[in-house]
Image (cartoon, rainbow, N blue to C red):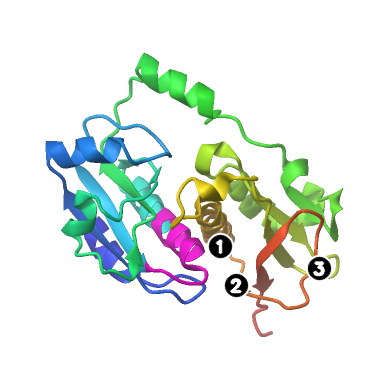
Amino acid sequence: KRLRDFLLTNVRGPFGNSLRFQVVDLTAMERDEIKTLGTYGFIKGARVFIVGAVAKGKWAMEDYGYCMEKNILAAAHLGLGTCWLGGTFNRSASASRINKRDDEVIPAITPVGYPNDRKSILDRAIRFIAKSHSRKAWEELFFHGDDRSPLARNVAGPYAPALECVRIGPSASNRQPWRVVKDKGENLFHFYVRRTPGYGKIFPDVSLQDIDMGIAMCHFEVAAQEIGRKGGWQRMPDAPPQRGLEYIVSWTERLSPE
């Protein structure tokens, strides 16, 4: 019930798209169908899933990734296990369960349950292939002023934990497409995506790497709030261009009045 209540409040992303999520109990046949569609992970024994929908449009994938990751963090806080399953679920049983409209897309779902402490041989092999425990080094992801100057942890200051939460976040095929450039003069962080060539063709209606950017935004914001830093997201027309990177959004700190 606590998770269902949270889903009812988590209905709008930072870019303004409206979303809706439901907890659904799928039949065995419906669960078998899902196994043929997802790309983020493999599951066994799960019956209950969080399924969501968002209208197709600008920044819809980022908002979906942001809000679904909030659901996943809420589930983890309750001691529940989850697993990102990204793909095309538009014609699956989960779509009919939430009465998906023609203008909506279901970019990803997640099972919810109590995780098995023992990992199977298949699970260990999959995690090894996907490098699930491996993450890029800090210096490959975070920069100061431009994408040629790695950001030192001491320069990141109070935001170092928030950036670390971005670094260890989940992503499709563990590609970690996010890059963050801190402004030299203030606590202003520009988020960029480094796209993998051809990756967007896997699912025409779903951009997995844009979902990943929403996940990164979620981790950064939640961690920043946890350490008492106030701020918000905005698109900045004067964000500095970077080599091989596509600008997404910026986090700007809001100072409390004296």
Q: Which contiguous range is marked in magenta?
A: 55-69
Among numbered discs 1 and 3, the one appearing first in the sequence: 1
- State yes or no: residue 3 in magenta: no
Q: Label 3 vs label 2: CA separation?
A: 16 Å
Occupied quadrant, residue 64? bottom left
Q: Answer with mark 3 or mark 2, whichever residue precedes in sequence.
A: 2
Q: Work out which quarter of the rendered image holds the N terminus and state it.
A: bottom left
Q: Which residue is mark 1?
A: 221
Percent of width and height locating residue 176: 61, 44
Q: Quadrant of the C terminus?
A: bottom right
Q: Residue at the far top: name it.
A: 121
Q: Amino acid at mark 2?
A: Trp
- Residue labelled with disc 3: 240
Depth check: give the residue in front, 196 or 211.
196
| Mark 2 neighbour class, 10 Å CA radius: few under 14, some 14 to 19, many 20 or more | some
Q: Secondary structure at mark 2?
A: strand
Q: Nearer the viewer, residue 148 or 154?
A: 148
Local packing at callout 1 (Cα closer than 10 Å; few below 14, some 14-19, many 20+) is many
In percent of width and height, residue 219 lies at 54, 55
The quadrant holding residue 190 is bottom right
Q: Residues within 10 Å of mark 3 (few under 14, many from 20)?
A: few
Q: Which residue is mark 2?
A: 233
Look at label 1 and name its amino acid: Glu
**What residue is at 26 percent from the left and 56 percent from the top?**
3
**SS class of the residue under badge 1?**
helix
For the residues bearing labels 2 and 1, Cβ distance under 8 angstroms: yes
Q: Name the amino acid type tagged 3.
A: Pro
